[in-house]
Image: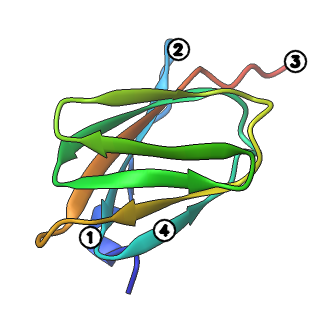
Amino acid sequence: MALSAAGAGRAPASVFFQASRLTIDSRLSMSTDRGFYCLVALQGEGKLVGKNFDDIPIKRGKSAFIPTTLDDYEIVNSGQSPMEVICCYPPTVEN
């Protein structure tokens, strides 16, 4: 199982930003259809793996900026315990 049900939390919408907390046991496919965001590792270690970039190691306390132009990618847990990350998104603008 790549994502535990308890780890799939989304913070309430905010005027300033939104956030999702994810728990990765092995690997998790990430879509980039929401635009740009910041990924912050809370615990564990792993790497970001994609077709159009070299593997990017990430561990507790490190962050990565995910640009709008990036293709879909995976977060791969390389540690012994589950990896936790938070994805911080800009606000949703409604017309």
What mark, if any, has residue 28 been given in the picture? 4
Of mark 3 and mark 4, the one earlier in the sequence is 4
The Cα–Cα distance between marks 3 and 2, rounded to whole angstroms, is 14 Å
Residue at x 48%, y 68% (from the top left corner): 28
Residue for badge 2: 15
Query: What residue type is disc 4 on?
Result: Leu
Asked if residue 35 is positioned above or below residue 22 in the image, the reply reads above
Of mark 1 and mark 4, the one earlier in the sequence is 1
26 left or right, relative to 29: left
Residue for badge 3: 95
Q: Nearer the viewer, residue 82 or 95?
A: 82
The Cα–Cα distance between marks 1 and 2, rounded to whole angstroms, is 25 Å
Query: What residue type is disc 3 on?
Result: Asn
- Helix, strand, or loop for circle 3? loop
Residue for badge 1: 6
**Callout 2: few (<14), some (14-19), or many (20+) C-alpha neighbours within 10 Å?**
few
